[in-house]
Image: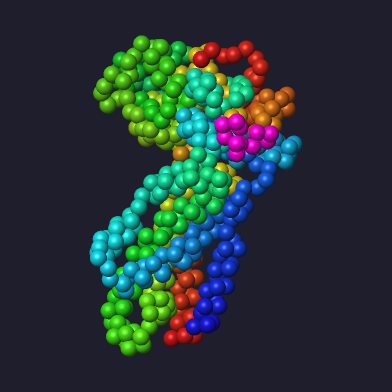
């Protein structure tokens, strides 16, 4: 409890370094979720409306990959981006770019699986209408994704939550370099290791506050656009 | 729909605009080093001086010595700065590192519960370990191939104790860094071997205190080397060598000796001096 009290008093005195760390966390995770959404929402919607042999298996695999261990993703991305690995020439390892790649890989299955479920449920109801419009697959996906845009926001927020809160992947591929790849979660982990529990808790509270602000902003935008385009 | 598409596009552009630069800045090097140098704050003290003098930015990835050498082996760092001479010499012999020089030393201590149930306190590391083993008091081992872990295993061997065969649940290998090992020792009132720097900057000590220190065998030599640019063409050899040269220069050595926590000197510069026996 002593630690918790110290933590709150520290929040009042957040310095420039902590703000830079919070900002890095935010841009890495938002970039990863944006890139992941561009790939996973169309793919998830496609998977929702097409039928092919083995589809239940693909759905099961995508669902299961929502639980990919971040540290495993980190290790695989590390091996790919290492100078000795296939993508080593990019020189991305131990940089914010590497962290975006790893978190994008983490976000994609979650986004695809949730999109698939949301779109599939709606598609069942709208199937006949869509048929009567004689739309091709891509047109249907566009109509469905637009129609479901407010529900899909939840999938995007879930992916953001997964990205900004994970430590295993960014630690391995980013290296927790002071002033360059240190994020909120790797900083919390580092301060815990150094036994500075009040500072670790203060950073944790700040991280939760950031997640709250992002979710609040998304809700506000959603409410606003719903009023404009009901 | 057009409005939504336009606003989505605007958000996308804004996000990508905030995306961090994907390629590293021109004049920067990556140094694979150990938690003891990073977490003690030594790099925070040294690097601004080096960068101020040369304009070269240094990015430190802090790992155990074994992992740091592995990062060097894969060509993912330009310089390796660690403390396990046997492993360093192997690294150089394999052709992964060149120009190894010794930079400084610090010392290890045994921390343990103030009540000292094993009666280990004193200045003889081997006797302390023998007493801990004889009384089967809990001992936390890093177990992570770090330089500190390698040193610990050497001390057990010198004390005549076959730790692999010791059995019992008093000897606990946790496979983690110095900080977690100290946290665990503090939580379970166990003995632990730590480098002095990490101990001094560690805040969650609980009932732990330094019990064994001052044995010459506890001195811990740090070496620095360039990752071999012939083996790994992406290595920034000029900038990396500049960092090594600065560390062993009068200015660098002075800066290392000046670093203090609570008035205590943590690292003792000894580049070019007589070697400290392990």
Does residue B211 appear left or right of residue B105 in this picture?
A: left
Taking the spot 49% from the left edge, 64% from the top edge, the residue there is A34
A176 vs B189, nearest the viewer: A176
Q: Quadrant of residue B53?
A: top right
In this orientation, does residue A168 appear?
no
- Indicate whether residue B237 is drawn in magenta: yes
Report the label total: 0
Residue B139 rendering spot, x and y as whole percentages: 35, 25
Residue B65 rendering spot, x and y as whole percentages: 49, 29
In this orientation, does residue A34 appear?
yes
Does residue A50 appear left or right of residue A12 in this picture?
A: left
Work out which residue is located at the far bottom of the displayed protein and give it: A132
Residue B174 rendering spot, x and y as whole percentages: 36, 32
Taking the spot 56% from the left edge, 43% from the top edge, the residue there is A177
Q: In this picture, is A43 found above or below B224?
A: below
A91 vs B29, nearest the viewer: A91
- Indicate whether residue B155 is drawn in magenta: no
Q: Quadrant of the C terminus of chain A?
A: bottom left
Taking the spot 69% from the left edge, 34% from the top edge, the residue there is B238
B166 vs A94, nearest the viewer: A94
User: In terms of secondary structure, what is the magenta stretch mainly?
Assistant: loop
Taking the spot 43% from the left edge, 52% from the top edge, the residue there is A166
Q: In this picture, is B136 found above or below B236?
A: above
Q: In this picture, is B204 found above or below A11?
A: above
Q: In this picture, is A228 found above or below A212?
A: below
- Residue range in magenta is B229-239
């Amino acid at each position: 409890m002593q630690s918790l009290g110290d933590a709150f008093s520290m929040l009042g005195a957040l310095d420039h370094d902590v703000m830079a760390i919070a900002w890095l966390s935010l841009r890495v995770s938002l970039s990863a979720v944006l890139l992941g959404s561009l790939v996973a929402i169309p793919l998830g919607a496609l998977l929702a409306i097409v039928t092919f042999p083995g589809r239940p298996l693909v759905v099961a695999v995508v669902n299961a990959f929502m639980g990919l261990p971040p540290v495993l993703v980190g290790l695989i991305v590390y091996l790919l981006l290492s100078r000795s690995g296939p993508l080593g020439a990019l020189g991305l390892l131990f940089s914010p770019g590497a962290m975006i790649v790893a978190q994008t890989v983490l976000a994609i299955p979650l986004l695809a699986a949730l999109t698939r479920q949301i779109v599939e449920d709606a598609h069942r109801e709208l199937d006949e209408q869509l048929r009567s419009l004689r739309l091709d697959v891509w047109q249907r996906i566009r109509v469905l994704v637009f129609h479901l845009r407010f529900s899909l926001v939840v999938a995007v927020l879930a992916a953001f939550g997964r990205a900004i809160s994970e430590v295993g992947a960014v630690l391995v591929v980013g290296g927790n370099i002071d002033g360059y790849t240190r994020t909120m979660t790797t900083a919390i982990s580092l301060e815990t290791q150094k036994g500075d529990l009040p500072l670790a808790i203060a950073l944790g509270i700040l991280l939760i506050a950031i997640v709250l602000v992002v979710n609040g902003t998304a809700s506000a935008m959603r409410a606003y656009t719903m009023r404009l385009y009901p | 729909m057009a409005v939504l598409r336009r606003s989505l596009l605007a958000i996308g552009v804004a996000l990508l605009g905030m995306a961090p630069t994907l390629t590293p800045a021109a004049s920067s090097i990556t140094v694979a080093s150990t938690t003891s140098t990073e977490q003690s704050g030594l790099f925070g003290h040294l690097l601004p001086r080096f960068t101020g003098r040369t304009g070269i930015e240094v990015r430190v990835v802090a790992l155990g010595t074994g992992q740091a050498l592995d990062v060097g082996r894969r060509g993912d760092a330009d310089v390796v700065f660690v403390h396990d001479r046997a492993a360093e010499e192997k690294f150089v012999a394999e052709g992964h590192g060149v120009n190894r020089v010794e930079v400084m030393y610090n010392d290890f201590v045994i921390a343990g519960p103030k009540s000292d149930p094993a009666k280990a306190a004193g200045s003889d590391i081997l006797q302390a370990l023998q007493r801990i083993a004889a009384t089967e008091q809990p001992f936390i081992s890093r177990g992570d191939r770090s330089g500190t872990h390698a040193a610990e295993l050497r001390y057990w061997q010198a004390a005549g104790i076959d730790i692999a065969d010791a059995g019992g649940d008093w000897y606990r290998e946790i496979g983690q860094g110095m900080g977690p090992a100290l946290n665990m020792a503090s939580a379970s009132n166990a003995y632990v071997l730590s480098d002095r720097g990490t101990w001094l900057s560690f805040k969650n000590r609980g009932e732990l205190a330094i019990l064994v220190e001052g044995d010459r065998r506890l001195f811990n030599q740090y070496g620095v080397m360039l990752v071999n640019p012939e083996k790994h063409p992406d290595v920034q050899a000029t900038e990396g060598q500049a960092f090594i040269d600065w560390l062993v220069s009068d200015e660098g050595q002075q800066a290392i000796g000046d670093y203090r926590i609570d008035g205590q000197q943590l690292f003792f510069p000894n580049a070019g001096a007589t070697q400290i026996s392990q």
